[in-house]
Image (spheres, rainbow, N blue to C red):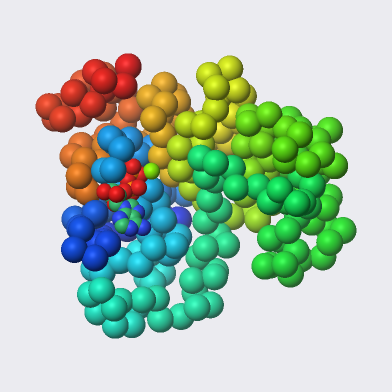
Amino acid sequence: MNDTKPVIEIRDLHKSYGALEVLKGVDISAPAGHVVSMIGSSGSGKSTLLRCCNLLEDSQQGEVLFEGEPVRWKGEGLNRRPADPKQVTRIRTNLAMVFQQFNLWAHMTILQNVMEAPVTVLGRPRAEVEAKAREYLEKVGIGDKADAWPAQLSGGQQQRAAIARALCMEPRALLFDEPTSALDPELEQEVVRVIKDLADEGRTMIIVTHDMRMAHDVADHVVFLHQGLIEEQGPPAELFGNPKSERLQQFLSHSA
Ligand code: ADP
Ligand code: MG
């Protein structure tokens, strides 16, 4: 039995933007060492759900738990906010996010990009962070690019730098929002390779992706989101091999 708490867990989460209800009661859980993939059409709420996990978005109802510890709220409904900024910082720094558009700082070298948050947010000693940063850049295969500027790198290299930057926070889990969507197919594979390595290492990850092959190959559990609700979920072999919901069947036939 695995009696450790999931790194991140969402229970019955409701989220609206004004009158638009985007998440209508969603549960998701990422146990330690597991990879959860989230798939679904554009606009189904995948990015919103991911951003609710690390409290980049507020939600109006339901719970968010980090390693079993519930987020404490103040206010209700559209006025609900996290009550404790320190708790928010702790959760956010432990759930490192990797975005579709890399979001590297253009005016910093790759090494500076990777070092920035551990030094300024976590207050770790520079020398120690630099050693770690170089290690993670090696790990994602761009150790030779430490002194380059983001604009000098290919998209695939920039995304690998963004992954190294996330790793350098030494987070409890990684959240990926369509990490390969902005990349040409040949560059996509070098990023998929890195993500597979992280999965093999037993990293806890939630990966939103349009890449069904990657979802199939790396995930322990796949969640299909449809119009703000989980329509179907299960192990990848089941979900992709024997989809039950008609909506999922339709979605998969369009994304082959
Ligand atoms: P996905 O990532 O699955 O494509 P999103 O979570 O980005 O979906 O969006 C879900 C819905 O929420 C969409 O209808 C989108 O237009 C809407 N939405 C997303 N962000 C905002 C926002 N900041 N303000 C208003 N509506 C938003
Ligand atoms: Mg999205």
Tell me if 68 is positioned left or right of 224 in this view: right
How far across and how far down the image is residue 143, in percent? Answer: 80, 35
- Residue 203 location (% of width, % of height): 54, 43
The image shows residue 149 at horizontal and vertical percentages of 78, 41
Residue for point 23% across, 75% down: 77
- Picture residue at 68% right of the left edge, 60% below the top: 117
Indicate left or right for 209 with 133 as reference: left
**Position of residue 26 in the picture relative to residue 204 (left or right):** left
Q: At 72% from the left edge and 67% from the top edge, which residue is drawn? A: 120
Q: Residue furthest left?
A: 246
Residue 58: tell me if it is visible: yes
Q: Quadrant of residue 240?
A: top left
Asked if residue 49 can be seen in this view, the reply is: no
Percent x, y of residue 200: 56, 32
In this view, 249 is above or below 207 = above
Residue 153 vertical position relative to residue 30 in the rendered view, above or below: above
Image quadrant containing the C terminus: top left
State whether residue 113 is above or below residue 19.
above
Query: 256 and 12: which one is in front?
Result: 256
How many numbered callouts? 0
Residue nearest the observer in this picture, 196 or 85 = 85
The residue under the point 62% across, 37% down is 159
Q: Could you tell whether 235 is left or right of 100 in the image?
A: left
The answer to which image quadrant residue 194 occupies is top right
Comparing 169 with 147, the one in front is 147
